[in-house]
């Protein structure tokens, strides 16, 4: 078995017209099932309660006292030291898989060789010149249904970081009412990860099949050795979960945003991991801009906001933009948890 995570399905949504999993999708896309409504820019959107049919407005607005913190590179808030240490074990067990973009190379140059408006890591009067060799870029983001604490899902997230892909993630925590039923409607079973490529119409289960597809279509065609060791890969992916056992696996009741959140992150970062855990637990769809070392998106984020640091969150539903993993976690819980 190439890799699945499978849990018995909840029956909290009205059924969809099912489509069996195959190598192609129908041209008409399924609509996103919305259980909650939102208030954006002061305009409430009402939805009907599933149990009573009563129209109930649901408000999505940032905490009144929330202020984006000043970003501090490599800084760890004292109350989050053990969280970051536990999350870092995943990178250790996976030997840094997901930290570097495909074709990564680095050279040490004088700090004067790279202009201040160009991204580079600086130390002791020198800078690292980092590059990568990436494959064709998909026109539309790949769509992946998965959850954080599944080892097979992590394999797919690692190749997403390596290939530097933008992906819309639809979190599917246990007992999640929105996207688990959608996966069953599209593919015929609740099994994870599940990938949809809107650029080609391809949809598939099985982590190894997804990895092979992505490296063939958007990479060099070669699966990295750390993702091609069969049982050893699966075992180390499982060990990677030890430091954060159970985090990012079960649903916490939350408001469903009308628009996916946007996050700049990459799989090998422990700071990014603790944010994704909460995104998954709250079942918040999010557009991930992969930015592993060597990624050109590091320069893009620098140009966009004046610096690079991951994770970085932009919430189009509230207008909040913020760095710092601890602050992002607190913002997500205060804004979306019910």
Image (cartoon, rainbow, N blue to C red):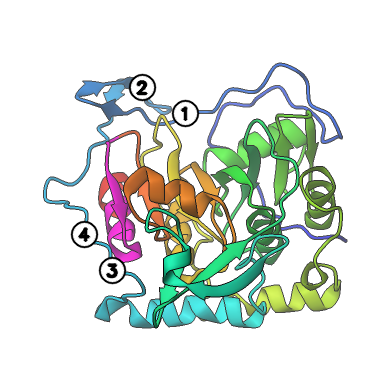
Residue at x 27% of width, y 42% of height = 320
The answer to whether the residue labelled 1 contacts the one labelled 2, judged by CB atoms less than 8 Å apart, is: yes
Can you identify the residue that label 4 sits on? Answer: 69
Q: Give the range drawn in magenta.
A: 318-332
The answer to whether the residue labelled 1 contacts the one labelled 3, judged by CB atoms less than 8 Å apart, is: no
Work out whether mark 2 precedes mark 3 in sequence or the reverse, and give the earlier one. 2
The answer to whether the residue labelled 2 contacts the one labelled 4, judged by CB atoms less than 8 Å apart, is: no
Cα distance, mark 2 to mark 3?
A: 40 Å
Q: Regarding mark 1 in the picture, which secondary structure is present there? A: loop
Can you identify the residue that label 2 sits on? Answer: 47
Give the answer, above or below, for where 189 lies relative to 16: below
Expressed as whole percent of the image width and height from the top left, the position of residue 118 reads 44, 55
Expressed as whole percent of the image width and height from the top left, the position of residue 34 reads 47, 28
Q: Can residue 251 be seen in this view?
A: no
Q: Regarding mark 4 in the picture, which secondary structure is present there? A: loop
Cα distance, mark 2 to mark 4?
A: 34 Å
Residue at x 82% of width, y 36% of height = 21
Can you identify the residue that label 3 sits on? Answer: 72
**Which mark is nearer the camera, 4 or 3?**
3
The answer to whether the residue labelled 4 contacts the one labelled 3, judged by CB atoms less than 8 Å apart, is: yes
Viewer-proximal residue among 326 and 111: 111
User: Magenta stretch: residue 323 in it?
Assistant: yes
């Amino acid at each position: 078995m190439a890799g699945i995570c499978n849990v018995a399905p909840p029956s909290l949504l009205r059924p969809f017209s099912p489509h069996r999993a195959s190598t192609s999708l129908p041209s008409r896309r399924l609509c996103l099932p919305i259980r909650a409504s939102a208030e954006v820019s002061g305009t409430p959107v009402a939805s009907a309660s599933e149990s009573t049919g009563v129209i109930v407005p649901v408000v999505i607005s940032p905490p009144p006292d929330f202020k984006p913190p000043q970003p501090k590179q490599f800084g760890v808030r004292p109350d989050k030291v053990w969280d970051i240490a536990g999350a870092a074990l995943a990178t250790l067990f996976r030997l840094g898989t997901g930290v570097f973009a495909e074709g990564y190379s680095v050279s040490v140059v004088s700090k004067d060789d790279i202009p201040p408006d160009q991204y580079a890591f600086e130390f002791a009067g020198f800078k690292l010149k980092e590059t990568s060799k990436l494959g064709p870029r998909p026109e539309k983001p790949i769509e992946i249904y998965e959850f954080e604490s599944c080892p097979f899902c992590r394999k797919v997230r690692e190749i997403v970081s390596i290939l530097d892909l933008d992906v819309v993630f639809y979190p599917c925590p246990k007992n999640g009412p929105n996207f688990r039923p959608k996966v069953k409607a599209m593919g015929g079973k609740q099994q994870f990860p599940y990938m949809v490529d809107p650029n080609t119409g391809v949809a598939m289960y099985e982590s190894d099949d997804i990895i092979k597809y992505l490296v063939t279509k958007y990479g060099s065609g070669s699966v990295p050795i750390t993702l091609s060791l069969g049982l050893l890969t699966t075992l180390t992916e499982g060990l990677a979960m030890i430091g954060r056992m159970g985090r990012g696996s079960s649903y916490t009741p939350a408001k469903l945003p009308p628009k996916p959140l946007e996050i700049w992150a990459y799989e090998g970062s422990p700071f990014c991991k603790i944010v994704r855990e909460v995104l998954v637990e709250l079942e918040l769809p999010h557009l991930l801009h992969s930015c592993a070392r060597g990624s050109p998106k590091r320069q893009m984020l620098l140009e966009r906001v004046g610096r690079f640091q991951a994770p970085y969150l932009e919430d189009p539903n509230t207008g909040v933009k913020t760095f710092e993993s601890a602050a992002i976690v607190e913002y997500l819980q205060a804004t979306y948890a019910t």
